[in-house]
């Protein structure tokens, strides 16, 4: 540190900082107890799962939806489709609980495509989703710094296995043509975005106001619907608020 004071101030500062940090850590820091870590993990798990506590899925009986099911085998992907999905995997994504990194799937897509194809086909044919692909690595990320409330100041970031994402993407490609999506669904649909959602809202508002006879006359549609139930004082206060 003494030799770098004049020649390399940045290196001198970094050396002094490291020396001071080592001394401070040796005096004040200690490793947390395993029991304390388990208690914190349990509290975070209860906090993250609280919104779904007590919710039971309302699954219909098979007899009620049997007439809606197609009398055909489910579509299966080809090795070429699997290879294409593997080649488009983002290599910078985090590794999940299966310890298979995304860059490995992308780099060796040619070699791994037949293996992944067998896994996907077996999952579809047997109607079973691999249990290990349901496991996610949950990391608590502070919403504010420093966090003070363990129950409210953290949000969960889930890292799923990359193969689980591959299976979901293939299932979407195979069954997308069978989906019946409403025209007002703008999220997670091709060709739609927040811009299309705002455009749709603006058009509906225009049709209900300026593009209608009542709107051009300056009469609010709500007043026409519920005018009989409104008093004159209520209507007058409404128009007064518009003029202010």
Image: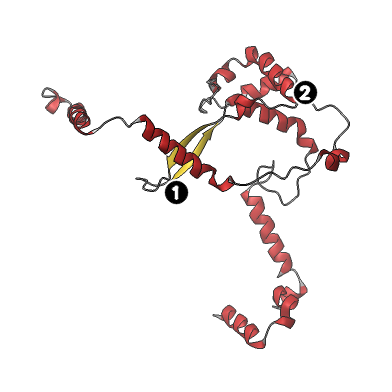
Residue 241, above or below 105: below
Q: Earlier in the sequence, mark 2 or mark 1?
A: 2
Q: Report the front residue among 30 and 212.
A: 30
Q: Residue at x 71, y 17 (%)?
A: 118
Q: Which mark is drawn over residue 125?
A: 2
* Residue at far front of view: 35
Q: Which colour assignment does the render follow?
A: secondary structure
Residue 88 spot, x, y in % from top left: 62, 25
CA neighbours of label 1 inside 10 A, class few (<14), some (14 to 19), many (20+): some
Residue 229 spot, x, y in % from top left: 72, 81
Mark 1 lies on residue: 152
Q: Report the front residue among 96 and 63.
A: 63
SS of the residue under disc 2: helix
- The quarter of the picture where the N terminus appears is top left
- Labels 2 and 1 touching (C-beta < 8 A): no
Q: Is residue 180 left or right of residue 20?
A: right
Residue 2 spot, x, y in % from top left: 10, 24
* Residue at far top of view: 111
Residue 5 spot, x, y in % from top left: 13, 27
CA neighbours of label 2 inside 10 A, class few (<14), some (14 to 19), many (20+): few
- The quarter of the picture where the C terminus appears is bottom right
Q: Residue at x 63, y 51 (%)?
A: 195
Tell me how far mark 2 sits from mark 1, CA to CA: 43 Å
Q: Residue at x 71, y 70 (%)?
A: 209
Q: Is residue 123 left or right of residue 18?
A: right
Q: Which mark is drawn over residue 144?
A: none
């Amino acid at each position: 540190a003494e030799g770098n004071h004049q020649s390399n101030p940045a290196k001198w500062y970094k050396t002094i900082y490291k020396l001071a940090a080592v001394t401070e850590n040796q005096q004040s820091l200690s490793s947390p107890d395993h029991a304390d870590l388990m208690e914190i993990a349990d509290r975070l798990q209860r906090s993250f799962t609280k919104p779904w506590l007590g919710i039971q899925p309302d699954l219909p009986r098979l007899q009620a939806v049997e007439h809606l099911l197609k009398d055909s085998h489910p579509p299966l992907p080809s090795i070429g489709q699997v290879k294409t999905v593997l080649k488009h995997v983002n290599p910078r994504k985090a590794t999940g609980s299966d310890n298979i990194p995304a860059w490995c799937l992308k780099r060796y897509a040619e070699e791994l495509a037949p293996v992944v194809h067998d896994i996907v086909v077996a999952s579809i044919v047997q109607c079973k989703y691999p249990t290990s692909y349901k496991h996610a690595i949950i990391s608590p990320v502070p919403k504010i710094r420093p966090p003070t409330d363990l129950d409210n100041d953290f949000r969960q970031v889930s890292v799923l296995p990359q193969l689980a994402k591959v299976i979901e993407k293939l299932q979407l490609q195979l069954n997308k043509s069978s989906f019946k999506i409403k025209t007002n669904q703008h999220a997670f649909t091709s060709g739609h975005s927040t811009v299309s959602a705002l455009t749709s809202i603006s058009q509906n508002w225009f049709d209900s106001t300026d593009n209608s006879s009542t709107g051009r006359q300056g009469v609010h549609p709500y007043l026409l619907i519920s005018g009989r139930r409104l008093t004159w004082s209520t209507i007058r206060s409404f128009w007064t608020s518009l003029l202010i």
